[in-house]
Amino acid sequence: MSNTLYDLLEVSQTASQSAISESYKRLYAGCAEQSAGGDEDATNRLIALREAFNTLSRPEKRKAYDLKLEARSSAPATESPSSFPFFKLLLLAIVLGTCGVSYSKYQSVQEQARLEREKTAAATRMAELEAQKAREEKMDAEQAESRRRRDEAFERANREREYSYGKQVSRDIQRAETAVNREKEREKEREERQRQYDAERQLAKEKATLRRLEAENSRYPRY
């Protein structure tokens, strides 16, 4: 059983504030798990640890407590029976015991209520985190769907543009081929007209030569 608050926190009376704080956190964490599981002794120990730390973590309270320890250590070990009757000791023990039990129960109830509040706050925080995660996942999904639709629209526009360009190229090629064929036909027509013209000129020359010969023959008849 712990005799002093220092013993309760498992530190020496000359321990530094940081050592007291570290020991308190370590002991409190171990008891908190047991108290959450419904261990009443652990809950009472949590209350005692908190009271001890509240006293020893404040220099003025710690100094007053150290003075009390010094006074208690310097006081006589026992009192004379004649100066402190037995029934007074018994009455004082009963009063102190009743008060201690009542205060312990009160502190236990308060500690349980605090733990329940912490559980409720933790559950609420967890629900908020889950809701936030769900909102973020929904937002990510909506953004992914928006990107997919935008990419599909972009690809569709590219295909339509490529199709229109292909049709335009095909029309240009057809017009070019038509122009070339038309030019070839016109060239053939020109060549054909040139041949007819040359043939007509040749025929006209031959007719003129024939008429000249006939005229010469008629001028100089043969006998």
Image (cartoon, rainbow, N blue to C red):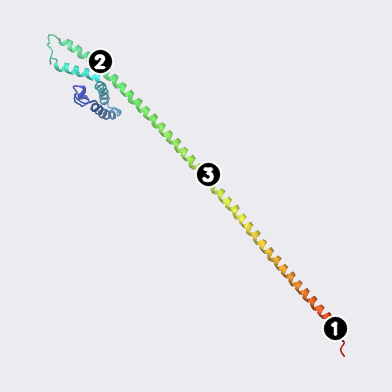
Residue 26 lies left or right of residue 147; in this view the side is: left
N-terminal of the pair, mark 3 or mark 2, is 2
According to the picture, the residue beneath numbered tag 1 turns out to be: 216
Q: Is residue 127 above or below residue 5?
A: below
Q: Secondary structure at mark 1?
A: helix
According to the picture, the residue beneath numbered tag 2 turns out to be: 99
Mark 3 neighbour class, 10 Å CA radius: few under 14, some 14 to 19, many 20 or more = few
Q: Secondary structure at mark 3?
A: helix
Front residue of 35 and 75: 75
Give me the residue at 72% from left, 68% from top: 190
Give me the residue at 70% from left, 68% from top: 188
- Percent coordinates x, y for residue 184 in the rendering: 68, 66
Q: Label 2 amino acid?
A: Cys
N-terminal of the pair, mark 1 or mark 3, is 3
Res. 63 image quadrant: top left
Mark 1 neighbour class, 10 Å CA radius: few under 14, some 14 to 19, many 20 or more = few
According to the picture, the residue beneath numbered tag 3 turns out to be: 150
- Percent coordinates x, y for residue 166 in the rendering: 59, 55
Q: Is residue 146 above or below residue 8?
A: below
- Percent coordinates x, y for residue 186 in the rendering: 71, 65
Find the distance from the CA under tag 1 to the CA under tag 3: 97 Å
**Label of residue 143 in the image:** none
Give me the residue at 85% from left, 85% from top: 217
Give the quadrant of the N terminus: top left
